[in-house]
Amino acid sequence: MNKEERIKVLQDIIQIPSENDHEEEVAKYIADLLQEHGIDSQLVEYAPGRSSLVAEIKGQEEGKVLVYSGHLDVVAAGDHEEWSHDPFGAEIVDGKMFGRGTTDMKSGLAAIVIALIELKEANADLKGTLRLALTVGEEIGMLGSEQLVDEGYLDDADAFLIAEPSGNEAIINAHKGSIQYEVIAHGESAHSSMPEEGIDAIQLLVDYINIMNDKFDQAFNTDEAYNDQLGRSLNVNTVIEAGTQINSVASKAVMKANTRVVPEAGNDLVVKMMQDTMDELNEQNDGRLELNLLQNNPAAESSPDNALVKAIQASADWEVGTQTLAGATDASNFGRISDDYDLAVFGPGETSRAHKLDEYVEVADYLKFIDLYIETAKTYLA
């Protein structure tokens, strides 16, 4: 593709408003684009209107399987009137393309798709397979990556390059896992002048929080719970909703929270601690505590000098280091396939621009990463 065609692909998919849903329209656009260039693909339906996409090209010889991955969804644009540019207009001003998803992460998505196409058209001398795994629902639930792993689409993968925005200076080779959850306290309402006639759901929640703060502190702050790359697990309580009016005992209270986990103090340990504490409190009190897991994704970890990182560094014409990330990506699910895989999260755009008003990507940055992805595949699958 020439420069104008590369840019148009990104503009086209930015103009499809796949806000936390409706990813199938983007997937179908990409499937048609691939078909125009002689590449078959498969749509993997998650729900009506929501489909991930899998496609691949094979080299002349057997070899490793390198997966290029990106997500098809974007977060909500919010009030369009607050944007300086139409969030789904993909307008280019002073070398910057504006729009929801330009950074997170349709520029990376378009770049890996175009890299696959250009490698196919150049009949590149690859040893092995380059596969696309484009997912739904990464922003809320990491739904598509979980489905692709569960249904075996990636069982043979040796490496994952996830084109999330990272900036140009460092490749992310590891990140913490994420447990997003609700603690629901069920009580019984009563007049606030007679609280003994009810069961205070807020107090149930407070008791749970106090106990769990101590348990988290003890579990996370030992030498054995420390990860050399990622540090320690941590828990943050982020939302509390309770009660209906000031003179009534609250019959229900809901807390939302997020635990960022490392393997040494990981998902199973955290969930068991929470459930055991709820069970103990439920035996002691008339009310009831309930755990609702919204997302339960493990950490993703690979060596900072793994073969894929080295391939990227060899392919870039600038200095690139490595770093870890406290946040999570689809790699949380991909890592369930094997304990031994090469991971690199590296893509166009700065993470600081993601999810913001007037989100944008530098067009030159986007174009540069297409070439980088092409050279990285040639190097890794040499």
Image: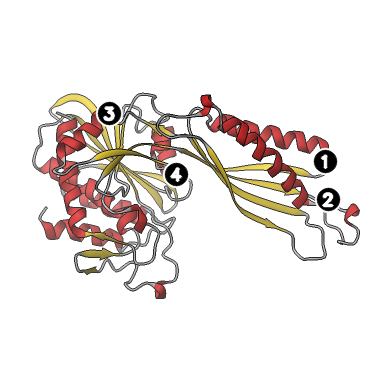
Q: Is residue 186 left or right of residue 194?
A: left
Cβ atoms under marks 2 and 1 closer than 8 Å: yes
- Residue 199: numbered disc: 2
Q: Is residue 239 left or right of residue 21?
A: right
Element marked by disc 4:
loop
Q: Which residue is mark 1?
A: 285
- The amino acid type of the residue labelled 3 equals Asn
**Which badge, 2 or 1, comes first in the chain's sequence?**
2
- The amino acid type of the residue labelled 1 equals Asn
Q: Which residue is mark 3?
A: 306
- Circle 2 packing at 10 Å, graded few (<14), some (14-19), many (20+), is many
**Which badge, 4 or 1, comes first in the chain's sequence?**
4
Question: Residue at image x 21%, y 57%?
Answer: 9
Q: Nearer the viewer, mark 4 or mark 1?
A: 1
- Residue 142: numbered disc: 4
Q: Position of residue 217 (x, y in %)?
A: 61, 35
Question: Residue at image x 82%, y 65%?
Answer: 247
Q: CA distance from mark 4 to mark 1?
A: 36 Å
Element marked by disc 1:
loop
Q: Nearer the viewer, mark 4 or mark 3?
A: 3
- The amino acid type of the residue labelled 4 equals Met
Q: Position of residue 199 (x, y in %)?
A: 83, 50
Q: Position of residue 282 (x, y in %)?
A: 78, 38
> Which residue is nearer to you in this view: 15 or 357?
357
Cβ atoms under marks 3 and 1 closer than 8 Å: no
Q: CA distance from mark 2 to mark 1?
A: 9 Å
